[in-house]
Image (spheres, rainbow, N blue to C red):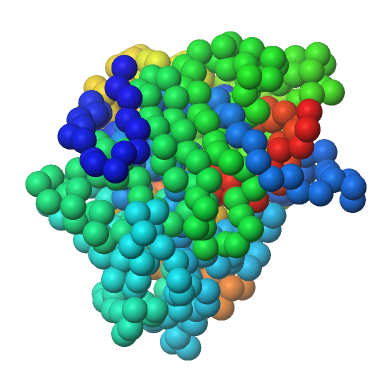
Amino acid sequence: MHIFRRQSVRPSLVLVLTAIALALFVACGDDEAPESAAVPSAEPAAASPATSAPAFEAASEDDAIAYGGVLVRAHATDPAGFDPVQDSSIAALDLIAPIYSQLVRLDPAAPDGALRPELAEGWEVGADGRSITFHLRQGVQWHDGQPFIADDVVSHFNRVISPPQGLFSSQRAPFLDVVDITAPDAGTVVFQTGNPSAGLLRSFAGGHYMVVSKHVMERETAEDPRGLRSNPEALVGTGPFTFTEYKQGSSFRVDKNPNYWDEGKPYLDGIEFFIMKDSAARFAALATGRVHTTPSGTASLTPTQARQARQDYGEAIDVVEARGPFWMGAAFNVNRSPFDDARVRQALSLAVDREAYLTLVTGGAGGVGMTAGFSPPNTPLGLSTEQLLGLPGYGADREGDVERAKLLLAEAGYPEGFSTAIMVRSDVPVWVNSALFFQDQWRKMGLDVQVDQAEFGASIGRMLQGDYDVRIGGIAFNTTDPDHYLWAHFTTDGPNNLSYATDAEADRLLAAQRVELDPARRRELAHAAETRLLTEVVPAVVGHYAVYLYGVRKEVQGWAPRDFMLYNQSRWDDVWLRAP
């Protein structure tokens, strides 16, 4: 076991890391790593409107905020690293987010509402949509006592957008239109874009965009551009908590920052994360009060555990459902025949019984998923349930969909089907079950389908090399903006286009929505692009959007998981503990 403690003299430390390809998936869910899968609660085939999860048992007027105490959280696995630029998994973000601050962040109580100031006290967007000027908070200090200044912001985002050779920046896509970052003075930063950018401001609020100090970054990366990943003692932020100790395979500890810029916060004395890889052990720790919360995301409660928590521990534990910013399904390699023919991809999408998928793969009502397209359902720029159910393959006419699928296969030259294989990582049951479901559905169409289970690392390597016919995978995102869940992944030259799909009309629509500053018109363009992707281009067949079931003991106040906010609710500065 490696033990790291914050000391006045930095020891030489080396932490065994996974390959850089691990960072490539924005969707990392705790015990499942990148591409975040699913293990929570389901809904019927028609997803109900997306709403914020209800708060836990509300504090009464007599419940004054209490200072002190240590929040104890279960955590499913050791992180691959500690660098916000490289390490996108929730396994890393949950640990380091309390240490850092962002320029702005989403308000957990109103994710689609006004942004919440952090290191930026104010900002202006240029009238032409080509610039954002941030006015920085004065008097902020890094945890090592150095002042926070504009050069820190410039340095950090230059590293995000234009990483040095050897560094993979996992979250650069939303900022690729930025052409210049300047600091007119120590308290001002200006971002310039080549084109109007409708979604850029809210992109800064994504939970991955924690600002790292220039002096720490330069020190830690002097010999290796990836150096920040390996040293937890380099976790020097401006956030509400400071790094204290990391025991590999055991625990991670942060303590209250007495010089936090938000006066009066945090309320807690600290946060202790116990690394517990076994789901049953995590549930037992929650039930007995050893931990206050389950891990975030996929490693929260299983449906069975959620039912038991409600039935047997309802007086002590709240179970809260929150929809995850991640879809999972079958992605086609359009560089391989016959998947280079859109008719084949359309046919295989029509052949899938989506209601049966939810029942058999995600557990139906109270299971681990909900039906959706590529967008988070019923969000401001996403398709509504009504729109989705009107699309081919999503409605009630299963017989008609299957007949149309057979005609398309015949038109493409495969009236008797063909042979193919579905690659899936072997370590996550819901992923394997998803592959088996698609295999069954497509065998009914006459296809000879094999399921090719691969070890996690091997599956990543094959994905990056394009060595697959169909793979089980998906997309996660920081904020509910089409630039994150559509443009980056489905534009021909998109930075994260791993299906290699190309379509001139989809490219046009996705490019147009990026620069459209009128919200209503942008919504129309995003809807048109997604509809075309789901029905004509079909780079993938969406099986489900994830739903997470969080277990939280009732003494935890001031925090509730919210829909699609997985990566944006880990600061813990507003949280306090009520007496049990």
Q: In the rendered view, does 439 fall on the left or right side of 316?
A: left
The percent coordinates of residue 486 (x first, y second) are 44, 54
User: Could one spot residue 111 in this view of the protein?
Assistant: no
Most foreground residue, 179 or 143: 143
Quadrant, the N terminus: top left
Q: In the rendered view, does 342 fall on the left or right side of 547?
A: left
Does 460 appear above or below 372?
above
Residue at the image position 35 percent from the left and 71 percent from the top: 149
Residue at the image position 63 percent from the left and 58 percent from the top: 264
Q: In the rendered view, does 47 fall on the left or right side of 500?
A: right
Residue at the image position 63 percent from the left and 19 percent from the top: 290
The percent coordinates of residue 161 (x first, y second) are 27, 61
Residue at the image position 75 percent from the left and 14 percent from the top: 308
User: Could one spot residue 292 in this view of the protein?
Assistant: yes
Most foreground residue, 378 or 222: 222
The percent coordinates of residue 232 (x first, y second) are 32, 38
The percent coordinates of residue 104 (x first, y second) are 51, 64
Furthest residue in direction bottom, as rendered: 127
Most foreground residue, 300 or 59: 59
Tally the marks: 0
Quadrant, the C terminus: top right
For residue 435, which quarter of the picture? Answer: top left
Furthest residue in direction front, as rendered: 8
For residue 342, which quarter of the picture? Answer: top left
